[in-house]
Image (cartoon, helix red, strand yellow):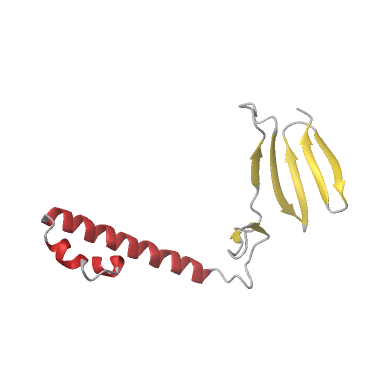
């Protein structure tokens, strides 16, 4: 990996050679770290088959970015603003038996908003 691969500018080489040797080494090390990071990202993305992910939980992204799969049976925790240190007012959400399950510290209130939306709140 060469530093010039990252910059994409041929005029950069002459200016680069005028830099102190320590700065050149540092820039080469950073370029190598960028390359290794990109390779790691590609390797991870290749392991995930978006057509058939083995999961039931995804982080929803805006189009055109694909949703991000999380490990099967992941639970996601949400905290209401001002949630106490003992967790009262927090929610945990996950899939269980093919159904959405919500756990809360404190009682739950479920209010239908429209035919396909509900509002879930804690009693606190």
* 60 horizontally vs 38: left or right: right
| Residue 96 can be seen in this image | yes
* 5 horizontally vs 61: left or right: left
Could you tell me which residue is drawn at 84 percent across and 54 percent down? Answer: 116
Of all residues, the one furthest to the front in this rendering is 11
Quarter of image, res 71 = bottom right
In the image, 13 versus 31, the foreground residue is 13
Please tell me whether residue 101 is drawn above or below residue 33 in the rendered image. Answer: above
| Residue 1 can be seen in this image | no
* 32 horizontally vs 24: left or right: right
State the image coordinates of residue 59 (x, y, percent, origin top left): 62, 55
State the image coordinates of residue 105 (x, y, percent, origin top left): 72, 33
State the image coordinates of residue 35 (x, y, percent, origin top left): 33, 65
Please tell me whether residue 113 is drawn above or below residue 58 in the rendered image. Answer: above
In the image, 13 versus 95, the foreground residue is 13
Could you tell me which residue is drawn at 13 percent across and 57 percent down? Answer: 19
Please tell me whether residue 78 is drawn above or below residue 74 in the rendered image. Answer: above
Quarter of image, res 16 = bottom left
Could you tell me which residue is drawn at 86 percent across and 49 percent down? Answer: 114
Could you tell me which residue is drawn at 70 percent across and 46 percent down? Answer: 93
Q: Looking at the figure, which quarter contains the C terminus?
A: top right
In the image, 116 versus 83, the foreground residue is 116
In the image, 102 versus 33, the foreground residue is 33
Q: How many marks?
A: 0
* 40 horizontally vs 105: left or right: left
Q: Looking at the figure, which quarter contains the N terminus?
A: bottom left
Please tell me whether residue 59 is drawn above or below residue 91 in the rendered image. Answer: below
């Amino acid at each position: 990996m060469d530093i010039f691969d990252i910059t994409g500018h041929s005029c950069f080489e002459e200016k680069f050679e005028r830099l102190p040797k320590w700065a050149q080494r540092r820039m080469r090390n950073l370029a190598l770290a960028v390359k290794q990071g990109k390779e790691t990202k590609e390797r991870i993305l290749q392991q995930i088959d978006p057509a058939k992910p083995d999961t039931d939980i995804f982080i929803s992204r805006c189009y055109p970015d694909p949703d991000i799969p999380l490990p099967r049976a992941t639970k996601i925790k949400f905290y209401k603003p001002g949630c106490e240190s003992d967790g009262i007012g927090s929610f945990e959400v996950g899939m269980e038996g093919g159904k959405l399950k919500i756990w809360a510290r404190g009682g739950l209130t479920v209010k239908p908003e429209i035919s396909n939306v509900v509002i879930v709140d804690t009693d606190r």
